[in-house]
Amino acid sequence: MNLRRSHTMDLPQIEEKILKIWRKKKIFEKSLKRNKDKKRFVFFEGPPTANGMPGLHHVEARAFKDVLPRYKTMRGFLADRKAGWDTHGLPVEIEVEKELGLKSKKEIEKYGLAKFNEKCRESVWKYKNEWEKITERIAFWVDMKDPYITYENDYIESVWWIVKQIWDKGLLYKDYKVVHYCPRCGTPLSSHEVAQGYKTVKEASIYFKLPIKADPASFFLVWTTTPWTLPANVAIAVGENITYVKARVGEEKYILAKERLAVLNESYEIESEFLGGTLVGQEYEPLYEIKLDKPGYKVIPAEFVSTEDGTGIVHIAPAFGVEDMEAGRLHDLPVLMTVDEAGNFKEEVKQWAGQFVKDADPSIIADLKKRELLFREEMYEHEYPFCWRCHTPLLYYAKTSWFIKMTALREELLENNAQINWVPEHLKGGRFGEWLKEVKDWTLSRDRFWGTPLPIWECEKCHEIKVVGSVKEFKKKLRDLHKPFIDEVVFECPKCGGQMNRVSEVMDCWFDSGSMPFAQWHYPFANKNKIDDGEAFPADFISEGIDQTRGWFYTLLAISTLLGKGPAYKNVISVGHLLDAKGLKMSKSKGNIVEPMAIISEFGADTVRWYLYTVNQAGDPKRFDIKDVKDKYNRFFGTLFNVYLFFKTYTEKSFKPQKLFQPQNILDKWILSLLNSLIAEVSDALDKYDVVGAARAIENFVGELSNWFVRRSRRRFQKPENKSEKNEASQTLYFVLLTLSKLAAPFIPFLSEEIYLGLKKSKMPESVHLADWPVADKKAINKSLEAKMAQARAIVVLALAERALAGIKVRQPLAGLTINNKQLAINNKELVEIIKDEINVKEVIFDETLKDQVKLDKKITKELKEEGWARELTRQIQEMRKEAGLTRKDIISIAWHSTDKSLASLMTNWAKYFERENLAQEVIAYDKKAKYLLAKEMKLGEGKIKLGIK
């Protein structure tokens, strides 16, 4: 079947055909080659991990990524698009652990690091074919033949070079700090990783009592949401300038902040009032007897104490809180590490030794209650961090790690962010800007196996540090820079002559992806000019999901700022989350996942793309409803395709487009004005990275083109007064469709190509994606005409509404329409004729004294009624032609029979009209013996008539 003349649009079938054309003719490659010496448009591809199947959210991000490079290519820019693969880190390790049935780091070590890492290397390509397939299927043009791969030696060497620069600037350091720690994965996580995994949880919070040593009948009343940290308690903190009270409740006395007295929840008597400073140094009885190596179990002052919640007294466990650790160092408190790296209590916590800390909370609460040290327990709803990959609750956990001092670059980060154009704009100072204001030092090291090894060697004697920035520093070449092979490399300490061994950790995999602007080119060891001369840095454009404001968007900016190279990107589109039709997050457990290939197979990639561009603003969450996708398929694509088919159907094969065509018809002038306005609007929107605004403008135009221009021009195509009239209409619609195919090409590359190829003449580029972007002809833009046409259409809407209210069909002619020309000034004869024809009236009268905007003459004379019947019969005969399967060129005979005098008169008086309108050679009497293609009896007015066609 020739799809270009098919009256049933099958977009998926069209797309498969177009894909074959692109492959065969290497259109993507040619689109790059044509601009190879032109100005560059730099695009960075955020690297996915191919050990998981691509989802609909990946389609969303890739749909938005694809638009701008296509647009810029048509504008004459060289838009290289290098693909990339993120191949390291927990996402990969966890999948391999599942595959091998390994449940802990010890089991991995027993299995063997070399074998485990080799499995990881294989795992990252598990779904590579699926990724490549969907990438091609949605027409996301990116070079997948030469991608950057984060596990390759060249990439790792560039990452090491970056780390060395950070070390040389004094921004890389080792410290024993409280970090977000995943006990299942056995590694600390960075703040941007932690931000990916927060969940709202309800947990037990408790108010507990600490007996005061000097006054056993009195207690410090303390609140905590982490009962498991109580065995590690070494102090409590108060605010020196906060007012506290001693309140008697029954036989017991409690000290707490005056502003928090409401927590007592019962009658009390205040015995005394005092500032927190007077409590400093007081000692209390510990909850659990664990030997300390320094004095503890006392009151300390702290500025972070508040009266917003709790009791105004804060429990201090330096091993399990950032502020606790800082306070502990300030006041020389002991650090009680009561939990091992698996998240289980150590032996010194005898009652719960070996138990996972979060599971022990109920037992600890029960123990306090039994010892009469529990004041109250209540459920507390709050946001709690979970591991972004294995979903285990994270612990605040003291650990020696390597950090990058991002806090020293806070102002520089904010200055660089100020130079970036954000879509949506509110992210700049909002979600992203606030994140930068609160930036934390980057926890760089990971106690894992499959990742870029930290290029840090430490002397086992004097602890001198050496940071390697190039593989040239090794005496022998390594085939693989990963663990365990890299750990065999040792250096002689330049300070004491001792042996320097590599530290055991690998790096945060987000550092890998954030390094891609440089590492993808093996910078600075190769392609130095690409970065230093601005050829491939910074990016003009990047795009990913909104969660990357705490991920890749941040790490890109962080690393470019650390290197002193300004922002890594100039423009960013952050796309909103994809939800199901009910607004719920899509997940396998909920069974609401939409498989991308399934919906593409049904509606086409163009439809899915278009839905994502037009359903709402780029950064808004999208409720993905298949009904809405289907609606786009039918309304927008069906409309556009039908306009294209209309042109192909009613334009002769001998049609030749005229270069210097000058339209005379008002409809032609109007649609060409609208088209050139559209070119300007879409170009301006895309220059501002407003994909949604550009797409919606195209969608509105297609509606105008079909519902007004084509509908009002049908007669010029189907029954023109002369060849010139048809040629003029054809020239206009040809130019509009050809231009529209180019404007729509970045958004809907398949159907745009289909239309372009159906219109293309021999000397034109072989693909719409090799064509130049249209330039608006300002001389053709007539805003006055656009406004007047809009006013004429407003009159039509009002008049048709009055017809509908009166129950008079549009096919029934009426004598006249009166318009208040003060309110609706239409002084153009052609527009008046359009109004007359559209409303089906004989005359349009202007009257400034008319109270309403429009008024119809609803009186139907005998002549008008007869004309209305003639139009109705014409419509019925046209339907019979279609039902009989006739083409627009088939000539028929119309036979009729009626005993009704009025209908008999109608058929005689309007015979010539029926012949002209229905492509008939004669109107004759119905013969019962004759054979007809189709015969029908119908009621008209009070009478009946039988019609036959042959």
Image (cartoon, grey):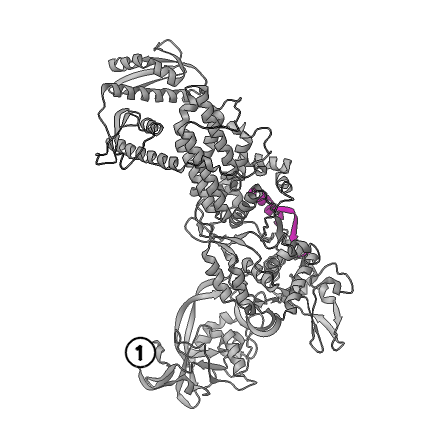
Name which quarter of the figure residue 487 lies in. Answer: bottom right
Farthest bottom residue? 214
Vertical relation: 202 (above or below) 744: below
Report if residue 135 lies within the magenta region: yes
In this figure, which residue is indicated by the disc labeled 1? 266
Vertical relation: 770 (above or below) 223: above
Regarding mark 1 in the picture, which secondary structure is present there? loop
Return the x and y of residue 451 as percentages of the image width and height: 64, 61
Write down the region rendered in magenta. 126-152
Name which quarter of the figure residue 672 lies in. Answer: top left
Farthest right residue? 476
Q: Is residue 156 visible?
A: yes
Name which quarter of the figure residue 668 lies in. Answer: top left
For badge 1, the amino acid type reads Glu
Query: Which corner quadrant holds the C terminus?
Result: top left
**Side of 107 where 940 appears, left or right:** left
